[in-house]
Image (cartoon, rainbow, N blue to C red):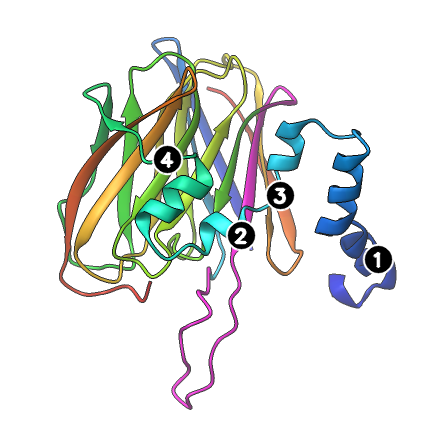
Amino acid sequence: MQNSNPRRLFLKQAMSASVVTVAAAAGLLTPRMVLAQWNADAFNATTAADAAGKSLGGAGEKSDKVKIKTPGTAENGAVVPIEISTTLPSPTQFAIVAEKNSKPLCITYDVEDGASVSMVGIRIKMGKTGNVTGIVKSGGKLYMAQEQVKVTAGGCA
Amino acid sequence: MATKVRAKHKDGETLIKALVNHPMETGTRKEKDGAVVPAHWIQQMTFTIGGKKVVAAQLNTTVSKNPYISFKTAAGKPGDKVELSWSDNKGASESGSTTIK
C-alpha cells in the first residue's frame, strides 16, 4: 500500500544513497549521520574477517572484559540467542559475527554518548556449527569474545 | 505486524527488550514449487529514551524471524518513554513504545 502511493515512493527515492552522499559532500551531515545508512558492504561480506573489518574496522583482541553468552548447542539453527556483555567504559559499538554463515555479520549496535550500554542481545540464524564472535569498541579500541555454537539443525543462513 | 517494547529499571540500569513481528526472509529460501522467496528484512532499529537516541542497530538477513532484541543502558529512569522505530528493505516502518517501570 505504501509503495503504491507516489508521494511515499518519491520520499523513499529522495532518501536514496546518492542524495545522502551529496548532502555529506556538501557538509550537511556529520559522519555519525552518514553511518546511519545500512552498511551493505559489511553485511554482504562473506568472511568473518571482512565483516568485522568493514563494520568496526577490525576483529579486536580477546578480552576478559567482554563476555559472550550462547546456548553452546543449538538444536534449532533458526533461533540462536546471543548476548554480549561488557565491563568496558562507554562502549560506542557492538557487532555480532557468525563465521560460518554465508553472510557472517548479523547485527551492529551504535551506542550514543552517555547511553553506557553494558549488554546487547539478539536471536540469530546459523547455518552450521561455527564460532560466534562479539566485538565491542570502547575508547576507539576493539575487544572481543568468542564461543563455538554447535548447530544440530541448520537455520538457512 | 506488531512492535512490542518492554523496559525495566533495576540497579541503576534500564533493561530494554523488544519483539517485532517480521518474516526476516534471507532471499535464499524456496517455496515448495521452487520459487525463491525474495529477501525481506528489517535493516535498522532505533531506540530512544525520552525522545533522545540511545542505540541504533543495523540488522542483516541472518537475524531470526520475529526479531527479539535487548540491551542494558545506564540511560533512562522509571517513567521515561522508550520508543523503538524500525524500517525494512522494502521501505516499511513501524514503531512501538513503552514507559520504563
Q: Position of residue B58 (x, y in %)?
A: 50, 43
Instruction: Evaluate if marks 2 and 4 touch, with contact meaning CB atoms under 8 Å apart.
Output: no
The answer, for residue B18, to whether it is visible in the render is: no
Using the numbered discs, state the Cα–Cα distance from disc 3 to disc 2 in whole angstroms.
Answer: 8 Å
Q: Which residue is mark 2?
A: A40
**Mark 4 or 3, nearer chain start:** 3
Residue type, mark 2 in image: Ala
Boundaries of the magenta span: B24-53
Is disc 3 placed on a helix, strand or loop?
Answer: loop
Label 4, secondary structure: give it.
Answer: loop
Check disc 1: other Cα within 10 Å, few if <14, some if 14-19, many if 20+.
Answer: few
Residue that badge 3 annotates: A37
Disc marking residue B49 = none
- Residue tagged 1: A10
- Of mark 4 and mark 1, the one earlier in the sequence is 1
Q: CA distance from mark 2 to mark 4?
A: 17 Å
Q: Amino acid at mark 3?
A: Gln
What is the magenta segment's predominant secondary structure?
A: loop
Dots 4, 3 in contact, CB < 8 A: no
Dots 4, 1 in contact, CB < 8 A: no
